[in-house]
Image (cartoon, grey):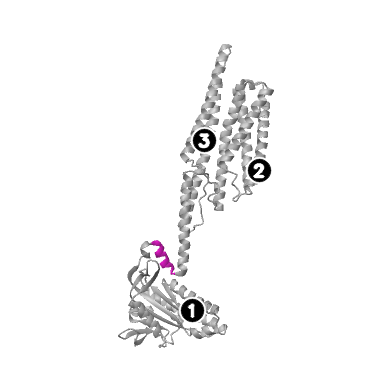
Amino acid sequence: MLGQTVQVNSMKAGFHYLIAVVILTVYGIEVCPFLERLGPFEIATVLVLGFVISGCVRFFIFKQICKEGTRVEGAGWSYRPARILLLDLGLWVLAAILVGGWNFWVYDFPPESGLKVVLGCVTLGIFSSALLALDAERDLIVKLSELGNSQALRTHKFFSITSKFMLFVGSSLVVISAVVLLLIYKDFTFVISEFSNGRSFEFSWIVREVLFVFAVLILGCFLVARRYSRNLRLMFDLQLKAFGAVEKGNYDTLVPLVSNDEFSVIAEQTNKMIGGLKERERIKRAFGKYMDPQVAEAVLSSEEETNLGGRQANVAIMFTDLRNFTPLSERCTPQQTVAVLNEYFTMVVSAVHRHGGVVDKFIGDAAMAIFGLDGTEGTCDKALRAASDIHRGLSGLNEDLVSRDLPEVRLGIGVHYGVAVAGNIGSEERLEYTVIGDSVNTASRLESLTKELTSPVAVSADFYNELSEAGREDLVYIGECDLKGKSSKCPVYGIPMTAKISSWG
């Protein structure tokens, strides 16, 4: 990848050299009287030879850069934009010295004429080097963004965008001023010489010369400014892309830090924010495996959720418990027993979450779930549908057990609707989020009652009264039953043994 980038960059440099040959040839013929004795072909030949030598040196230097880059993670450590700028500018100076030296030794040009050639090459070299460095910077920004490498080109010295802008403006003014002063000096010298010798001259020559030079300078400044603004726009786009990815829940996007300026400060803070959100998401997923995801989200979203105490809510509480599990355990190894429990609890959790409930805890082979903590309507209907799914899913579990020559298990489900307190119990050092209250005890007693009933499901009258008409269709009144710890009998509803499981929910 780096080799391809360097190759494209070298082709651009060669194109810049070609443009420079054309500009300097035209400029030399129009400006320097010592070049008038040389034809355009001779002038262009001298310039081409100088730039060919400079181009060959550039090829070998950048070939070495390419080799260094392959030994560095990210394939771009040595391909820094600032390094490209200095190398290219040095090569332009080398070309200027070669051309100026050749003209001095071979054609006996005066020093001021050679200075104009050097200044012309350096002026064009500043623009060319800046353009190539900005192209290299853009390529690296894109590459590092694709690789997710956010630190590869971080510099150590802070260099603000305003300082870069002032440096660019100051450098442009210095170059333009130097060229203009030299141009004025040359024109005044030419005019004085012509008047002294009594020769006529056309003022349009000077006008064409000035317009030509200013056109080159203004065009060069415009191209550099446009290329720099393009890179700034790219950094803006990467910032917005990162924010958009975070908004969608993707925390793998990082903003590359290419230079130590305001953009990199913003990018660094953005990456820290993304890292923090990613860590929070990881913790939430970990919490979600030890407590219900809704509870984990509440704990992470509010500091108050970590305080002792809780809030009162009308909820439906469901207890489920496996029957005949002890004979099954005797026939299984501990690993097999755990596997069966995990399969059963996976089915329970899926059913509870599917209908908007919260799994509070596992107690041996029993589970406790709560519906209605979010304050939505239809709480009891959702709890009944979850109980239906759990009862239906037990058939699949038993089929699997029978296929392995293991005894079947039965199920008891108790559901009650009432007031409970949802919150944290324990101490400041160790908390547990749960639901407590007499309603929880009633649901637990209803689940135990199913051991004495023909119905595997027992619900209270309070729960039954909160159901919709459709929810009550498959439930029948069992009668008033004694619940352990209760002073009075409780009306209980259940399902008849003839009821089809598929008709539930």
Give SS at disc 2. helix
Q: Earlier in the sequence, mark 1 or mark 3?
A: 3
Position of residue 306 measured from the top left corner of the image (x, y, whole percent): 38, 65
Residue type indicated by callout 2: Gln
Determine which residue is flagged by label 3: 222
Relative to 493, say whether 212 is above or below. Answer: above
Of labels 3 and 2, earlier in sequence is 2
Q: Looking at the image, tell me whether mark 1 or mark 2 is earlier in sequence order.
A: 2
Q: CA distance from mark 1 to mark 2?
A: 67 Å
Q: Position of residue 41 (x, y in %)?
A: 68, 27
Quadrant in the picture for residue 43: top right
Image position of 141 (left or right of 473): right
Q: Mark 1: which secondary structure?
A: helix
Image quarter in which the C terminus is found: bottom left
Residue 189 counted in the magenta span = no
Task: Return the residue at label 1.
Answer: 393
Hey, what amino acid is under mark 1? Gly
Residue 293 in view of the camera: yes
Q: Nearer the viewer, residue 38 or 488?
A: 488
Magenta region, residue range: 291-301
Please give the label number shown on residue 32. Answer: none
Q: Which residue is mark 2?
A: 64
- Disc 3 marks which amino acid? Phe
Q: Residues within 10 Å of mark 1 (few under 14, many from 20)?
A: some
Tell me which residue sits at (51%, 40%) in the image: 228
Which of the 4 quarters of the picture holds residue 449? bottom left
- Distance from the alpha carbon under mark 3 to that under mark 2: 32 Å
Distance from Cα at disc 1 to Cα at disc 3: 72 Å
Front-lying residue, 103 or 385: 103
Q: How many marks?
A: 3
